[in-house]
Every structure is written in structure tokens, then in C-alpha cells.
Image (cartoon, helix red, strand yellow):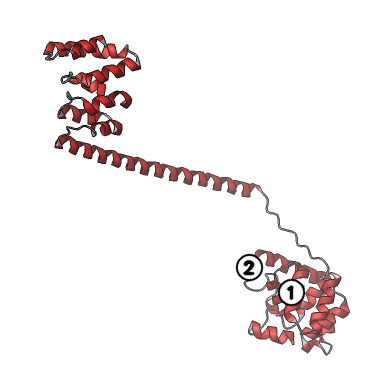
Amino acid sequence: MATVSSFESLRFPTKSDLAQFGELFEQLYAASTDEARRQAVAALSRCPQVPEETALFIARQPINTAAIFLMGSKALGDVTLMRILRATGPEHAHAIGRRDDLSPVVVEALVGTHQDQASRRTGEDRTAALAEAARLEREERIREELRALVRAATPTVETPVRLEPASAMHQVLFVRFAREGEAGMIAVTLADALASSQWLSERILLDVSGRQLAETLLALEVPQADTLFVLKAVYPHLAEGGAETLLAALDPAEAARRVESWQRADSYTTGDGLPKAANADDAPRGRPGADHKRAAG
């Protein structure tokens, strides 16, 4: 501070004075406390002449020290201010922008600096966004590869089909709805007994030959008398002995296997087409709506 005060007292410093002060200042500044540095910079901001290299040195210091010098020093000409703008960042440019004596040249330089910094930030933001997107894509690719490895290492296990005998309530409802001609409710009850979708039960009923329903009731272990009653009620053309002949021609074990295959197919599909295990001969003929109407009798 003694050196700065001595320099500040010189009304017309000579070139020699300026050169000597410039040589001493940086060394003394480096050896001083933060408070002494701020006091020295504040004092120099009042001096009409400061060595250019000293001014540039002060301007490059942290903004909390350099701000007062950048905002008020009369020793900073346009050339020096332009050099400072090129060498420092937005905080220093903001401090320069608060000067009262800005020339048009410096104002233009400030605008250009602001635009460059904004453009640089935009470019940095874009680069960061691209890097983040690449990172997320890479992580998702790794996750997908891990899923594929897990799938490859895990043996495919087919969900076991559970074909349980129809409950007593199911059996009662089959007979009741058959007696009342409620084909839709038979389909609902059949789907519940099979633990399947109603699509499967409706496709079974749409086989107007009655074979698929006969196989299903046989696989569900519905009593023979009830099975015959339901078949005759749903398919009137089986009333004259046809139901008995159809039922006698069926093998219970084979019927159970076929119905289980339908259950598996039903669990794999969304309802398009016949159950995968059904034979082509089982497919209902004509329009589904018309067949269902005939099936309901």
C-alpha cells in the first residue's frame, strides 16, 4: 500500500516512474493479503495513469477484486478495454459495460462479445445434449443386451394348462342356461369353467356340428345326462339320437388333450381365428352371427 500510495501521489508520473511501478506491483501484489490487494486496486482505479501491463494484470484478477477497476479506472483506454474483453469472461465484460464513458467502439465490442458468449453457450448446450442422448442410447443398448442374455440363459417354460373338472355350480348353470336358450350365458359359464377368454368359449359354441362342445363338456367331466341335455338344447338337430352317437364316438383322454391345446392357444393369442389346436374340419361354416343363432336354437 505504501508503494501504491507513493505512485498515487505522483501528479505527472514519468515513463521511468510507470516502468518502475509496473515492475514492482505484480511482485508486491502476489505477497499481499486479499484485503490489501483490494485496497490497492481501489486506489489505482482513481489514478489517471496506470502502466498498461499493470492494468491488464489487474483486469485479469477475480471479478470481486477487478470490478471496481474495470468500472471506474480512467486509465483504461479503448485499446486496453478491447484487450481485456478478449482475455476475460462475461463477468468482466459486464463490469466494463457499467462504465460511464464507453465509446461506440467498445459498445460494439461488448455486443459482439455477448453474442459470441451466447453462441458458445448454445454450442456447449447442444454438445451436452448430444452427449447426454448418446449416453442414454448407449445405456439402453446395454440394458437390451443384458435382457437378451437373460432370455438366452433362461429356458423357455411353457405355462402348464390347468384343465379342472367343472364345478357343481358350473354344471347346474350349463343345464339352466341350455333350458332357457341363453347361448350367451352358456359361453360365459364355459369360459369361467375353462379359465379362458370368452372368445374361446364362443368359438366352441359356433361349431354347429356340436363336436367341440361335446369334447369340452366331456373334458370338463360334466355328467353324461347333463351333457346330452345341453347338446340337444343348443343344437336341435342332435335331438333325435345324434347327441348320443356323437358322445359315444369321443375318447375322453383325447378330448382332454384337445381342450388343453385350445386353452394354451387362447393364452397366446388375442382372439383372431380359431384355437390353434382345432382341426380345419372343426371350423364353423357361414357367417359367425348366423351360425351362433342356429346353435342357440
| Residue 270: numbered disc | 2
Tell me the quarter of the image containing the N terminus: top left
Mark 1: secondary structure = helix
Left or right of 41 on screen, residue 273: right
Left or right of 62 on screen, residue 163: right
Of callouts 2 and 1, the N-terminal one: 1
Q: Residue 168 location, x and y as percent?
A: 86, 71
Q: Is residue 270 above or below residue 141?
A: below
Give, as a three-letter code, the residue at label 2: Thr
Q: Are there few (<14), some (14-19), or many (20+) residues within 10 Å of tag 1? A: some
Res 64 visible: yes
Res 251 visible: no
Q: CA distance from mark 2 to mark 1?
A: 17 Å
The answer to which image quadrant residue 31 occupies is: top left
Q: Are there few (<14), some (14-19), or many (20+) residues within 10 Å of tag 2? A: few
Q: Is residue 250 above or below residue 107?
A: below
Q: Nearer the viewer, residue 90 or 204?
A: 90
Q: Residue 102 location, x and y as percent?
A: 17, 34
Q: Residue 282 location, x and y as percent?
A: 70, 78
Q: How many marks?
A: 2
Q: Residue at x 69, y 79 (%)?
A: 281
Tell me the quarter of the image containing the C terminus: bottom right
Query: What residue is shown with label 1?
Result: 188
Q: Residue 134 location, x and y as percent?
A: 44, 44
Marks 2, 1: nearer the viewer: 1
Give, as a three-letter code, the residue at label 1: Val
